[in-house]
Amino acid sequence: MGTMSLVGKQIELDADGNLANRNDWSEDLARELAVQEGIGELTPQHWAVINFMRAVFEKEGDSPSIRRLTKESGVDTKTLYQLFPKGPAKRAARIAGLPKPKGCI
Amino acid sequence: MTQTNSPEPIQKVSIIVSRGSLDGVYPGLIMANGARMEGIEATLFFTFFALDAIIKKRMDGLKVATVGNPGMHMPTLLGAIPGMSAFATKMMKKEMDKIDIPPVAEFITMIHDAGCEIYACRATVDMFHLKPEDFCAEVDGVISVGQFYEKSAGAQIIFT
């Protein structure tokens, strides 16, 4: 638990450091968070992953597995690891304003 | 979970896969993929019958052992009935697909694309008279035990 200063506000975080309230998320927040995470400027491919993750979470209540991410978001495994180095599913979820994915795959 | 101190996070793992049944191969694959997902460097080393998991013609034909596998909760004689292993394998694959665990060939590609290096054991390759063309394209090389230890410098070694 903690807070983080983003888009000029104090944003509440969960135990993993992800947003505690999904309603705090905005595209501007995602851009700022990506810079803080060392990912830098978000490209259309980053957005394809982020938007896909958010859409799946909205419907199913959990983030998609990497396998599903690469099969359905249009971004392949290699690219995914380049876009979000050092743990793609976890880091993409954070920037998408979602909790850490629960699955093992 | 209680944690009083925060030890160094794991940076690198070397996973040895030694068994060739479906249930012998998957734990190592899942752990390798999981390591990469967490940003941990990973190397997979296949030895003995586990080489079937990286042999083109065999990788998607691995079976669950229904004999000599107490975890199946099945009497040995029942497990030995023709078709029983195929049936158990089919059931297990169906359940794995439900939780998004890919078939072996697809999983190997996914793990390799994720940046995990994949090696075959030199001694086993010689023992079974295998040729480079027997292996799937993801195999980065056939290496000796010594080379395996060299590549595992600084890694945690996991034997499965």
Image (cartoon, coloured by chain):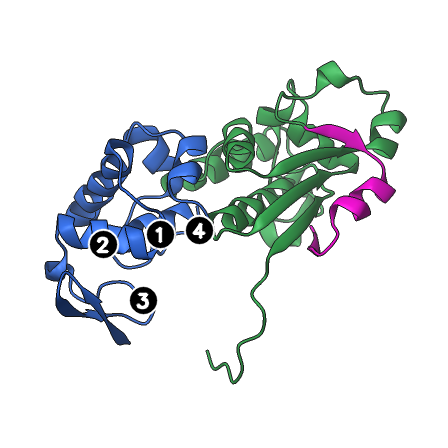
Q: Report how far apart the C-alphas of labels 4 and 2 lie in the structure.
A: 28 Å
Residues at marks 3 and 2 touching, judged by CB atoms closer than 8 Å: no
Q: Residue at x 70, y 36 (%)?
A: B20
Q: Colour of chain B?
A: green
Number of the label disc, if any, that sits on residue A17: 3
Name the kind of residue labelled 4 in the image: Cys
Q: Report how far apart the C-alphas of labels 4 and 3 lie in the structure.
A: 19 Å
User: Residue B10: percent from the left, percent from the top?
Assistant: 59, 61
Chain containing the residue with disc 3? A
Number of the label disc, if any, that sits on residue A32: 2
Number of the label disc, if any, that sits on residue B74: none
Image: magenta residue range: B140-160
User: Residue B38: percent from the left, percent from the top?
Assistant: 48, 53
Rendered view: B47 above or below B136: below
Number of the label disc, if any, that sits on residue A91: 1
Res. A61 in view:
no
**Furthest-bottom residue in this view:** B4
Residues at marks 1 and 3 touching, judged by CB atoms closer than 8 Å: no
- 1 or 3: tag closer to the N-terminus: 3
Image quadrant containing the C terminus of chain A:
top left
Query: Which residue in the protein does label 4 denote?
Result: A104
Look at the image and say whether residue B4 sits in the magenta stretch. Answer: no
- 1 or 4: tag closer to the N-terminus: 1
Name the kind of residue labelled 3 in the image: Gly
